[in-house]
Image: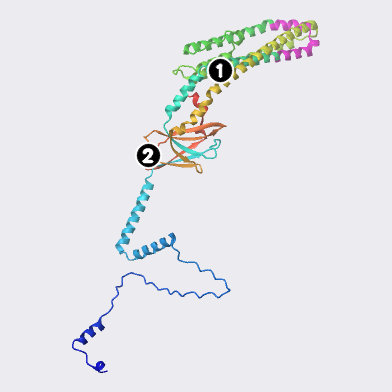
Amino acid sequence: MAEENAPPPAGGEVETAKKKLRLKVTRVEENQPRVRRKIFTPRPADEPGTQAAPAPPNEKRVGAGRILTELGQKAWEAAKGWNRNVWIGIGAVIGIMILSGVWQEWRKTVVRVRVELKDVRLGDKPEVLVLYDFTERLAGLRRDYGRRLAPLRPQIREIERTLSLARADAAGTAEKVRMVEQALGEEGAQVKKVFEDYRTSVSKLWVEEAGLLDKEFDEKRTVFLNEVEERARTLGLFYHPDEDEDLQQPEIAANEFRLALYRAPPSIKLPEQFGWIEAKLKGWHDFEKDWNSRYKGLGARAKQLRSPASTSLDLKQERVKIQDQELKKFRVDAQVIQKEIQDYEVRLKELKDREAQAKGPFEEDVNAIPEAFLCMRIPLDADVAPIGVDGKVAQAAPGTLRIVIRGKKDGQPAWVIRALEPVPHQKTEVIFRDADFQPISDWLERD
């Protein structure tokens, strides 16, 4: 007790006071969210005989979603403390990026391809092809196939010309048969009404005046043929009239003249020459119509000379017999001509089949061009396909790209080919219609 009530030694009070004034300082960091401590209470033990309840799932499971959420929260917390100038700078950068994108889009070079088709079919997946220039490749194919077809085409043209003349001859013979049959029918119906005076008068009429008409007809025909031949010789045309007298007809000569004009020199004005031959042929038809009218007039006069006292049944029957013989001759000639036509048609079909076989691989060779010269393939969506002039298209030399669209016209493969001519920094439009598509088979006929 004495020790407890004893005064403290000297200097002891100061040390005790210093100890009591000493404070514990904890460093607090700024902008740190307050974390609430969680108190975990132990779960009570299950009673015996009862099934334990499943543990609740951990709501805060570590994963990619949680990591991204926490990173986003931290980034937003950090962004809230940024200075106003930082936000202005970010807005300026975003504005510059938007303006730059708008400027580039406005200055972009685009060729917009649009199709307006009715008869042409483009298939299930239509597309627009941008190809490098394949003119030389196509020209090479034409030359190659032109050499294959060169021996066949002159034969085909010659047979077609001969077949045309044979058909014209067959038509003329058929007309003769019809006229004789018609005359025989008329003579058979009137054979009992023929009189002797009528026979004599009619014979004189036909011998004299009809002979003059026939002579006039032959003279006019000769003049027409000579004028056509002289005109062709003056123009320097490849014109050779037929030597057969039966084929020396104005219509045949006019056709020969027209065919010669297709191989005429370039200096000749074809419309003028076609107009001249059409005018000459029209004049001939007018004369032929007038001549037929006058010839029919002789028949009318012959009927006026009919007299009951001039009938002669025997002579009329003889005339019918002669016409019957002529009819048989014309029918034999018609059979011979028809046989020739059939032979020419068979020969022409053989040549056409050989021509088709020679032209067959041409389509396959042309279809291989796009894969070899492909620059860009663009789907044709809603009949529109934009071609952006960038990448390979922009790197290609000017004038070396072609726009190609493939389809079918009248059941035959047909393409449209047009040069790609973009206008710098502008959006242009190119429209394709049915008339722009050309069948592949027609390319072999071009020079």
Q: Position of residue 405 (x, y in %)?
A: 49, 36
Q: Quadrant of residue 398?
A: top left
Q: Position of residue 385 (x, y in %)?
A: 47, 42
Q: Is residue 393 above or below residue 169?
A: below
**Distance from the alpha carbon under mark 2 to that under mark 1:** 48 Å
> Please, what is the dominant secondary structure of the magenta stretch?
helix
Of residues 430 and 361, the one nearer the viewer is 361
Per the rendering, the mark at residue 331 is none
Q: Is residue 228 above or below residue 85?
A: above
Could you tell me which residue is drawn at 61 percent across and 15 percent down?
A: 344
Per the image, the residue denoted by label 1 is 156
Of residues 444 and 269, the one nearer the viewer is 444
Question: Is any atom of residue 139 visible in this view?
Answer: yes
Per the image, the residue denoted by label 2 is 394
Which of the image's four quarters has the N terminus?
A: bottom left
Q: Nearer the viewer, mark 2 or mark 1?
A: 2
Question: Is any atom of residue 293 visible in this view?
Answer: no
Whether residue 15 sits left or right of residue 345 in the image: it is: left
183 inside magenta stretch: yes
Q: Is residue 337 above or below residue 3?
A: above
Within 10 Å of the Cα at label 2, are there few (<14), some (14-19), or many (20+) other Cα atoms?
few
Of residues 51 and 280, the one nearer the viewer is 51
Q: Position of residue 295 (x, y in %)?
A: 67, 12
Q: Position of residue 128 (x, y in %)?
A: 47, 38
Part of the protein shown in magenta: 178-206
Of residues 273 and 130, the one nearer the viewer is 130
Q: Which amino acid type is shown beneath numbered disc 2?
A: Ala
